Amino acid sequence: MSAVMGWVRMPFERIGTSVIGFFTEAGEVAILAGQAAMWAVRPPYRIKNLFAQADFVGVGSLFIVLLTGLFTGLVFALQSSFAFAKFNAESLVGATVVIALCRELAPVLTGLMVAGRAGSAIATELGTMRVTEQIDALEALAVSPVQYLVVPRVLALIFTMPLLCMLFDYLGFLGAFIVSVYQAGINEGTFMGRIHRLVTLSDLVGGLFKASVFGAVIGLVGCHKGMRASGGSKGVGMAATSTVVTCSVSILIVDYFLTTFLIMIGFG
Amino acid sequence: MSEEPAIRVVDLYKSFGEKPVLKGVNIDFPKGTTTVILGGSGSGKSVLMKHLIGLLKPTSGKIIVEGQDLSELSNSALNTFRMRFGMVFQWAALFDSMTVGENVAFPLHEHRKDMTEAQIAQAVHDKLSMFGIGGTEKMFPADLSGGMRKRVGLARAIVLGPRIVLYDEPTTGLDPITTNYVDEMILQAKTSLGVTSVVISHDIGSAFNVADYIAFLYDGEIVAYGPPETVRASKHEFVAKFLSTWFKKN
């Protein structure tokens, strides 16, 4: 009888453990966010660290983001022109692609790319510092690891993600233009005219705001996972992997709620 | 002894989850002396040391440093309070992205805004020279031997002039000659700087070289305490067995 009860209970226990684990971690990330906000406004302001991180996150991610942007625009325009041709609406390809890029694809795909590159690197770097006691050494030297390590990384991501997103938008637009005009034969004037008429500034601004929020998510999750790493090189590797998975899932979940919020406040 | 100790540990309990690590530790660290905390692996030595500097918070009990109960300090006050300490980590914990010079200069850049770059460079050179590694400023930690890394770690720990220096397993992984050198370094730091030293170790020979007092930590409790000869005469079964492994050989 007890064996049967065990079998019945097991899936519920597993679900319960996962849910508790998720909320515990979300709570820890929220606490880290609060601490980072508190330390960000207290001197000394680590401008040099901030620029070094912005260089790593922004300039370092530039190539992969530009490449993703260009090919997203190319393929999305190709698929759209194929689909829209079925009901003679090819003239809408440009506007459709640009709206989708600005509002959704650019912030989300930039977030996923940066999570894979910078998020995992942050977790690895801080995880290595944790397991080699360098973070303890910072504390022992009366320096807050949150202020020294977390704040510059999170701020760098918050500031550089919209810039990367904007470049993604531009390269995506360029890709769409090339395919639509030179491959699908859509008139250049029609392509641009529809974009002028249908795409609004709020489409772009909403996307950039999303990118900034995703930057904060990547920075906080990466720093949290890294600073909690334990168990030597294996633990550091697990922190990096876990960061990419958690950031990717979080970006997709946060995206839904952000989109709902933006539509509610008139960015829809 | 009527003088207030540099550090007083009162009824310190620490558990990680369900697992108790420290089970009511009571110990004083007298000012200007070197106390070695001896114990086997997993006895809670490093956990005790991290409590002394406030890197871990007790489950219950108090850590009183120079009359100040650490539990009464806010996080930022504790951060400032830590400037009274220098800590030498087991594997030195040097910042691997910085050169040796930058590592030693780091606390000065952070906390001595009144110093010029030239003064900082001079202070770094003086501290490194004090431990016989002057001229290594431009090297990276990865280029140094274990003993040199420990010396850089100590130079970084004392560059702000702390009143208390904590050493976490300072001789682990070192050959006998380098171990002897590190022992001399600890004695030199005590005599020339007048600091209170707390050394965590399982190296019996090194402990008896540098200690004014030895505390033996076993299963989360202090089971023997006193000057080295007192601890050597301890009747506690594990202490006697632990010490005999070294004294029988030497």
Image (cartoon, coloured by chain):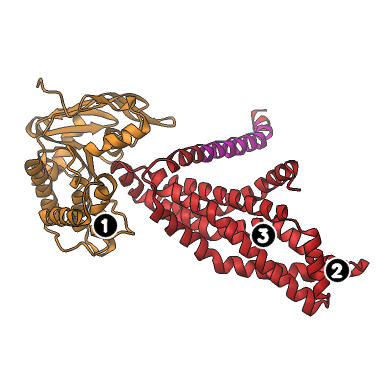
Chain colours: A red, B orange
Q: Of the residues shown, which amino acid type is indicated by label 3? A: Ala
Q: Is residue A257 visible?
A: yes
Q: Position of residue A110 (x, y in %)?
A: 62, 59
Location of mark 1 (residue): B102
Q: How far apart, in angstroms, are the residues tagged by discs 1 and 3?
A: 40 Å
Q: Of the residues shown, which amino acid type is indicated by label 2? A: Ser
Q: How far apart, in angstroms, are the residues tagged by discs 3 and 2?
A: 22 Å
Q: Of the residues shown, which amino acid type is indicated by label 1? A: Glu
Q: Eyeballing the image, is B23 above or below B170?
A: above
In depth, the one of A109 and B179 nearer the eye is A109
Please check whether the numbered discs 3 and 2 fall on a single chain: yes
Location of mark 2 (residue): A91
Host chain of mark 2: A
Image quarter (top left, top right, bottom left or bottom right) of the N terminus of chain B = top left
Please check whether the numbered discs 1 and 3 fall on a single chain: no
Q: Nearer the viewer, mark 3 or mark 2?
A: 2
Location of mark 3 (residue): A106
